[in-house]
Every structure is written in structure tokens, then in C-alpha cells.
Image (cartoon, rainbow, N blue to C red):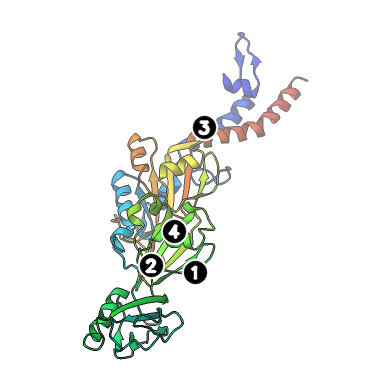
């Protein structure tokens, strides 16, 4: 009866409606085409769409050896494996909780040495060699400031070359006093580090003032060095902190360091701290609330958070069992069902299939990590494609039927 409504009905001899033969002849192939469309995995190329159907996406990963694309279902086991492979080593594990505080002397540092002796000692009683010397009533001598030589020593009268590299001022004082025993009467020594050029760290990157920050015996930590340079130029949750110590490089999101005091480790002389601005983002396409590039924090987000930030699935368009994540994955990230084909830079093209009709998937989605440059795509439901087809047919044919009915009335 609904065909007659569209094609135009005429009263039959028995009082029943009769469908014109022309209407039947037209709508019969239309219905056949609609039935064929509803049973197809794909969709006609001429029908408007925001992207491939779920069947077309799945077909692209059906033969990984040929296409080079791996199709992987998002499960709890897969999410856990990816989290484990992407886990960053904590600073407390890689750099250690203990550091080497400043105050130790090294080549290039400048020191000042003052020596006393008790009366009636005369070895150093002849006055001072520097303006900052002690009063003349005491038997003391303050020697000119001197730079520690490349071999890590300083020179003093009656003492000779004293090794100071890697030692504290207290240790050097003890060494000087020991060498003066038998030469001076109850000698005492004071060593002062006036210029520290070796016990420092370098801070560069997205800070207000890149600088070399000296370390003191108190023991400076990562956040102390950042504060000494005037803070950050970018939001804290967009910054990754990279520490280079010797030939090792370690990195962590700054937000994680602030949240966990154990990661605010002690610094060592020579450390290089780089505050890196990393604008991470993923792109969302298809039957979601919005299609755009969406930034996220250096700390990372889960698939659940990504779906929420994209506006969720559009209820009258989305196929809940047809959500996909397109990614270039590390070769060792998963155990591939088929030996992977890698790109020139060693990556594997992967399509992660997400079935949001399965409630268990929501638990896996909470731990599934989204990576930079991921593409999240939600395909259209088959009913949505069928509706578009009928809308197109009605938009084209309905005016023609109306014209035919008008002509038939004359």
C-alpha cells in the first residue's frame, strides 16, 4: 500500500485502491536495488559517505601478507600488552633516588685557602698574602684565590701540590693540615669554594631562561632547577622532561613528576635537563559528534577519553561495532597473528577494531592507550546508508511521479 501512496493510487472497480502499472514497473527495481544494498558489506561508490564502511575496513586487513595491514581486535589482553610496551621507565628507577650534591671541587673551580698556626709558630706568622686575611695579631695567612688545574690539584707554600678533584672542602682542609704537621705549630686550615664551574646542571628548552644552575651541598632536585630558570613557557601538561646523564637519556611527562615526589630525583653535576614541548594529538573522523584534530596531554589518554572528547558516537548514524583506530605501530608491540610487513622506518600498519556493542570492550577501552597521530574512525551503520539511498531516490523520483499524476488528471 505504501508504494501506491508514493506512486499515486486510483480507485479500482471494487472500491479498492489500484497501483498504476507504471508505478509498479518503476518501484520494483528500486526495491530490488535497496534489498541488494542492505545485504552488501560495502556501499555503492556513487552514494555519499564520510568514509569506508565497516566491511570495507575489515576487508583491507583480511590478508595482511598482501595488504601489509594487520587487523587486531581491542581486548583487555591487547590493551595490557600495549601499556606494557609503551611504559616509560620512571626516573626513580633509571636515575636513582640518590644524587651527588654540589660542593665537591673539580678542575676549573676557584678556591681560597686560609691557614692558621698557634703561637709561637712563625711559619705563617709573617702576615697575609691577600687583603681578606685575618687580623695581624694571629698567625694566619690567606693565599690568593687559585683555579684548580687540569690535573685536579692546587699549590700551597710548604705544602706542595694538593689533589682536590672530587673532594669536599672539608676533605681538602684535612689534607692540608696533615701535610703541615711538623712544619707548623698546631696548624688549622679553611678552604672556600669561591667559583663553582663544575658542580652544575644545564637547563634548556621551554623554560623562561636557559641557564647553568650550580649545585650546592644541600642537594638540588629536578623541580629546583626548573624553578631557578624562571619556570616554563608552556602548560605543564604539555611538557616532557628529558634528563641526559652521561651517555644515557631518560624522559618522563612533567605532570607525572609533579604528581609523584619520588620522580623529583636529586641532580648530579653535568646533568642536562631539557623541557620539551610536545603537542600530541589524534584525529577523529566518521560518525562522531565532531570530526577534527584533538590535542591531548603528554601524560596520555585512553580510548574511552578519546571517544568522549570526540563527542561520542552519533546515535542515528554510527555503527557501534564498527569503530577503528588506524596506527603505525612498533614491530615489537604485539605478537602478530601473521608475520608483519614493515614500513621503511620499521613500523607496522595496524587497524584496531573496537566493538562497542560488547560491554567488555568498555573495560579494555579504559586502559587502551591513544598515541600521537592516531586516527579514530567510526563507520556508518547499514541502516544509515539505506536511509540515505531512499532519501536520494525519493528526492529524484517524487517530483516526476507528481508530474505524471498531474498529467493523468487531464
For marks 2 and 1, give the CA distance.
Answer: 16 Å
Sequence order check, earlier mark of 3 and 1:
1
Q: Nearer the viewer, residue 305 or 100?
A: 100
Label 3 environment density (alpha carbons within 10 Å; few <14, some 14–19, many ≥20)? few
Real-space CA distance between mark 3 and mark 1, rounded to the nearest whole angstrom: 57 Å
Report the front residue among 117 and 26: 117
What numbered label is drawn on residue 316?
A: 3
- In primary-sequence order, the first of circles 3 and 2 is 2
- Spatial CA distance of label 4 from label 2 is 26 Å
**What residue did someone put label 1 on?**
211
Question: Residue farthest to the right?
Answer: 410
- Disc number lying in front (4 or 3): 4
Between discs 2 and 1, the one toward the N terminus:
1
| Discs 2/1, front | 2
| Disc 3 to disc 2: CB gap under 8 Å | no
Q: Residue at x 26, y 78 (%)?
A: 174
Rounded to the nearest angstrom, the CA distance separating label 4 from label 3 is 40 Å
Looking at the image, do the residues carrying marks 1 and 4 touch, with CB atoms under 8 Å apart?
no
Residue 93 image point, x, y percent: 28, 60
What residue is pinned by disc 2? Answer: 216
**In this rendering, the label closer to the viewer, 4 or 2:** 2
Amino acid at each position: 500500500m505504501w508504494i501506491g501512496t508514493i506512486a499515486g493510487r486510483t480507485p479500482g472497480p471494487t472500491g479498492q485502491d489500484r497501483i498504476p502499472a507504471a508505478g509498479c514497473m518503476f518501484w520494483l527495481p528500486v526495491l530490488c536495488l535497496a534489498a541488494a544494498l542492505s545485504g552488501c558489506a560495502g556501499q555503492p561508490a556513487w552514494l555519499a559517505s564520510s568514509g569506508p564502511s565497516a566491511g570495507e575496513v575489515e576487508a583491507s586487513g583480511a590478508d595482511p601478507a598482501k595488504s601489509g595491514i594487520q587487523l587486531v581486535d581491542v581486548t583487555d589482553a591487547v590493551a595490557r600488552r600495549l601499556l606494557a610496551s609503551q611504559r616509560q621507565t620512571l626516573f626513580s628507577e633509571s636515575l636513582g633516588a640518590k644524587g651527588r650534591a654540589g660542593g665537591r671541587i673539580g678542575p676549573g673551580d676557584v678556591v681560597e685557602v686560609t691557614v692558621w698556626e698557634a703561637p709561637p709558630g712563625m711559619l705563617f706568622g709573617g702576615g697575609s698574602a691577600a687583603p681578606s686575611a685575618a687580623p695581624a695579631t694571629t698567625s694566619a695567612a690567606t693565599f690568593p684565590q687559585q683555579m684548580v688545574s687540569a690535573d685536579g690539584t692546587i699549590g700551597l707554600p710548604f705544602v706542595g701540590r694538593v689533589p682536590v678533584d672530587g673532594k669536599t672542602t672539608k676533605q681538602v682542609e684535612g689534607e692540608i693540615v696533615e701535610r703541615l704537621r711538623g712544619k707548623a705549630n698546631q696548624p688549622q686550615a679553611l678552604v672556600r669554594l669561591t667559583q663553582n664551574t663544575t658542580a652544575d646542571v644545564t637547563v634548556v628548552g621551554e623554560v623562561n631562561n636557559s641557564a647553568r644552575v650550580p649545585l650546592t651541598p644541600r642537594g638540588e632536585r629536578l623541580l629546583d632547577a626548573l624553578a631557578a630558570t624562571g619556570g616554563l613557557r608552556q602548560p605543564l601538561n604539555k611538557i616532557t622532561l628529558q634528563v641526559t646523564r652521561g651517555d644515557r637519556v631518560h624522559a618522563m611527562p612533567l605532570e607525572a613528576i609533579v604528581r609523584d615526589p619520588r620522580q623529583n630525583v636529586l641532580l648530579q653535576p653535568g646533568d642536562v635537563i631539557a623541557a620539551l614541548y610536545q603537542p600530541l594529538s589524534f584525529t577523529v573522523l566518521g560518525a562522531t559528534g565532531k570530526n577534527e584534530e584533538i590535542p591531548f596531554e603528554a601524560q596520555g589518554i585512553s580510548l574511552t577519553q578519546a571517544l568522549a572528547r570526540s563527542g561520542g558516537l552519533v546515535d542515528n548514524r554510527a555503527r557501534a561495532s564498527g569503530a577503528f583506530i588506524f596506527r603505525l605501530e612498533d614491530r615489537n608491540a604485539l605478537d602478530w597473528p601473521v608475520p608483519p610487513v614493515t614500513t621503511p622506518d620499521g613500523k607496522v600498519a595496524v587497524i584496531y577494531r573496537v566493538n562497542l556493542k560488547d560491554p567488555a570492550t568498555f573495560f579494555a577501552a579504559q586502559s587502551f592507550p591513544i598515541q600521537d597521530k592516531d586516527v579514530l574512525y567510526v563507520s556508518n551503520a547499514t541502516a544509515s546508508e539505506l536511509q540515505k539511498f531512499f532519501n536520494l531516490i525519493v528526492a529524484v523520483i517524487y517530483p516526476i511521479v507528481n508530474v505524471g499524476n498531474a498529467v493523468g488528471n487531464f
